[in-house]
Amino acid sequence: MSALTDVVDGIVHEPTQVREDAVDLTVNEIYEIHGPGRVDFGGGELTDADLVPHSRTWRDQGDDYQWWHLEAGTYLLEYNESLTGPAVLQARGEILERGGSHPTLHVTELPRVPLTVGGAGLRLKENERVSTLLSR
Protein backbone atom coordinates (compact mmCIF):
# COMPACT_ATOMS: atom_id res chain seq x y z
CA MET A 1 0.00 0.00 0.00
CA SER A 2 1.20 3.49 -0.84
CA ALA A 3 2.17 5.93 1.93
CA LEU A 4 0.19 8.46 -0.10
CA THR A 5 -3.05 6.86 1.10
CA ASP A 6 -2.38 8.60 4.43
CA VAL A 7 -2.78 12.01 2.74
CA VAL A 8 -5.34 11.23 0.00
CA ASP A 9 -9.07 11.16 0.78
CA GLY A 10 -12.01 10.27 -1.43
CA ILE A 11 -10.46 7.35 -3.32
CA VAL A 12 -13.20 5.92 -5.55
CA HIS A 13 -11.88 2.34 -5.96
CA GLU A 14 -8.74 1.58 -3.94
CA PRO A 15 -7.78 -1.74 -5.64
CA THR A 16 -7.63 0.03 -9.02
CA GLN A 17 -6.18 3.38 -7.94
CA VAL A 18 -3.52 2.54 -5.33
CA ARG A 19 -0.11 1.12 -6.21
CA GLU A 20 2.95 0.66 -4.01
CA ASP A 21 4.45 4.01 -5.01
CA ALA A 22 1.52 5.97 -6.45
CA VAL A 23 -2.18 6.82 -6.33
CA ASP A 24 -4.21 7.42 -9.49
CA LEU A 25 -6.73 10.26 -9.33
CA THR A 26 -10.16 10.25 -10.91
CA VAL A 27 -12.09 13.00 -12.66
CA ASN A 28 -15.11 14.45 -10.88
CA GLU A 29 -15.90 17.36 -13.19
CA ILE A 30 -14.63 19.03 -16.35
CA TYR A 31 -15.18 22.79 -16.64
CA GLU A 32 -15.24 24.99 -19.71
CA ILE A 33 -13.79 28.47 -19.28
CA HIS A 34 -16.53 30.86 -20.48
CA GLY A 35 -15.17 34.17 -19.24
CA PRO A 36 -11.72 35.44 -18.40
CA GLY A 37 -10.29 35.56 -14.92
CA ARG A 38 -8.18 38.49 -13.84
CA VAL A 39 -4.68 38.48 -12.31
CA ASP A 40 -2.91 41.64 -11.19
CA PHE A 41 0.42 42.44 -9.58
CA GLY A 42 -0.80 42.99 -6.02
CA GLY A 43 -3.72 40.58 -5.94
CA GLY A 44 -6.32 43.21 -5.11
CA GLU A 45 -8.05 42.76 -8.47
CA LEU A 46 -7.80 38.98 -8.62
CA THR A 47 -11.02 37.44 -9.93
CA ASP A 48 -11.97 33.90 -10.91
CA ALA A 49 -12.70 32.87 -14.47
CA ASP A 50 -16.31 32.14 -15.36
CA LEU A 51 -16.55 28.33 -15.33
CA VAL A 52 -19.36 26.14 -16.63
CA PRO A 53 -19.47 22.36 -16.18
CA HIS A 54 -18.99 20.65 -19.56
CA SER A 55 -21.98 18.58 -20.65
CA ARG A 56 -21.91 14.78 -20.40
CA THR A 57 -23.58 12.18 -22.57
CA TRP A 58 -24.58 8.54 -22.27
CA ARG A 59 -22.59 6.21 -24.51
CA ASP A 60 -25.06 3.38 -23.92
CA GLN A 61 -28.32 3.64 -21.99
CA GLY A 62 -27.26 0.73 -19.75
CA ASP A 63 -24.07 2.45 -18.60
CA ASP A 64 -23.65 3.56 -14.99
CA TYR A 65 -21.56 6.60 -15.94
CA GLN A 66 -21.65 9.25 -18.63
CA TRP A 67 -18.90 10.56 -20.91
CA TRP A 68 -17.45 13.98 -21.62
CA HIS A 69 -16.88 14.60 -25.35
CA LEU A 70 -14.04 17.13 -25.33
CA GLU A 71 -13.06 19.03 -28.44
CA ALA A 72 -9.55 20.45 -28.90
CA GLY A 73 -8.93 23.18 -26.32
CA THR A 74 -8.23 23.81 -22.66
CA TYR A 75 -10.51 22.85 -19.78
CA LEU A 76 -10.22 22.73 -15.99
CA LEU A 77 -10.15 19.30 -14.41
CA GLU A 78 -11.53 18.68 -10.90
CA TYR A 79 -10.75 15.50 -8.98
CA ASN A 80 -12.92 13.26 -6.79
CA GLU A 81 -10.02 12.95 -4.35
CA SER A 82 -8.42 15.49 -2.02
CA LEU A 83 -4.84 15.77 -0.77
CA THR A 84 -3.38 17.01 2.54
CA GLY A 85 0.35 16.48 2.04
CA PRO A 86 3.20 16.89 -0.44
CA ALA A 87 3.16 14.97 -3.73
CA VAL A 88 3.98 15.23 -7.42
CA LEU A 89 0.97 15.31 -9.74
CA GLN A 90 1.35 14.13 -13.33
CA ALA A 91 -0.90 13.09 -16.21
CA ARG A 92 -1.35 9.34 -16.70
CA GLY A 93 0.22 7.78 -19.79
CA GLU A 94 -3.20 6.68 -21.01
CA ILE A 95 -4.27 10.33 -21.22
CA LEU A 96 -1.01 11.50 -22.82
CA GLU A 97 -1.12 8.78 -25.49
CA ARG A 98 -4.60 9.88 -26.51
CA GLY A 99 -3.88 13.56 -27.00
CA GLY A 100 -4.62 14.99 -23.55
CA SER A 101 -2.14 16.57 -21.15
CA HIS A 102 -1.80 18.63 -18.01
CA PRO A 103 1.24 20.13 -16.29
CA THR A 104 3.30 18.19 -13.79
CA LEU A 105 2.98 19.98 -10.46
CA HIS A 106 4.44 19.78 -6.95
CA VAL A 107 1.32 20.03 -4.75
CA THR A 108 0.17 19.87 -1.14
CA GLU A 109 -3.52 20.06 -2.08
CA LEU A 110 -5.37 19.36 -5.33
CA PRO A 111 -6.27 22.44 -7.32
CA ARG A 112 -8.31 22.40 -10.48
CA VAL A 113 -5.78 21.58 -13.19
CA PRO A 114 -5.76 22.83 -16.80
CA LEU A 115 -6.39 19.90 -19.14
CA THR A 116 -5.30 20.47 -22.72
CA VAL A 117 -6.91 18.36 -25.43
CA GLY A 118 -5.27 17.99 -28.83
CA GLY A 119 -6.64 18.15 -32.37
CA ALA A 120 -9.02 15.19 -32.64
CA GLY A 121 -10.53 15.66 -29.20
CA LEU A 122 -10.84 13.21 -26.32
CA ARG A 123 -13.60 11.17 -24.71
CA LEU A 124 -13.43 10.78 -20.92
CA LYS A 125 -15.73 8.66 -18.82
CA GLU A 126 -16.91 9.85 -15.41
CA ASN A 127 -14.51 8.70 -12.66
CA GLU A 128 -11.80 7.92 -15.23
CA ARG A 129 -8.26 7.77 -13.83
CA VAL A 130 -6.61 10.82 -15.42
CA SER A 131 -3.66 11.70 -13.18
CA THR A 132 -1.14 10.08 -10.84
CA LEU A 133 0.21 11.27 -7.51
CA LEU A 134 3.77 10.27 -6.62
CA SER A 135 5.59 10.85 -3.33
CA ARG A 136 7.97 13.80 -3.31
Image: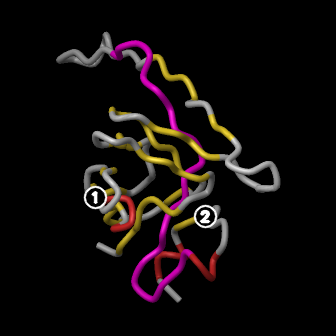
Q: Which residues are magenta?
A: 17-37
Q: Is residue 38 left or right of residue 8?
A: left
Tell me the kind of residue under disc 2: Asp
Q: Main secondary structure of the magenta part?
A: strand
- In the image, 14 versus 47, the foreground residue is 14
Query: From the viewer's perspective, is residue 14 above or below residue 86?
Result: below
Residue 95 circle label? none
- In the image, 10 versus 34, the foreground residue is 34
The image quadrant that residue 11 belongs to is bottom right
x, y percent for residue 61: 80, 48
* Residue at image coords 51%, 44%: 78
Query: From the viewer's perspective, is residue 40 above or below residue 69?
Result: above
Label 2 sits on residue: 9
Colour convention of the picture: secondary structure
Residue 106 circle label? 1
x, y percent for residue 39: 26, 18
- In the image, 131 versus 98, the foreground residue is 98
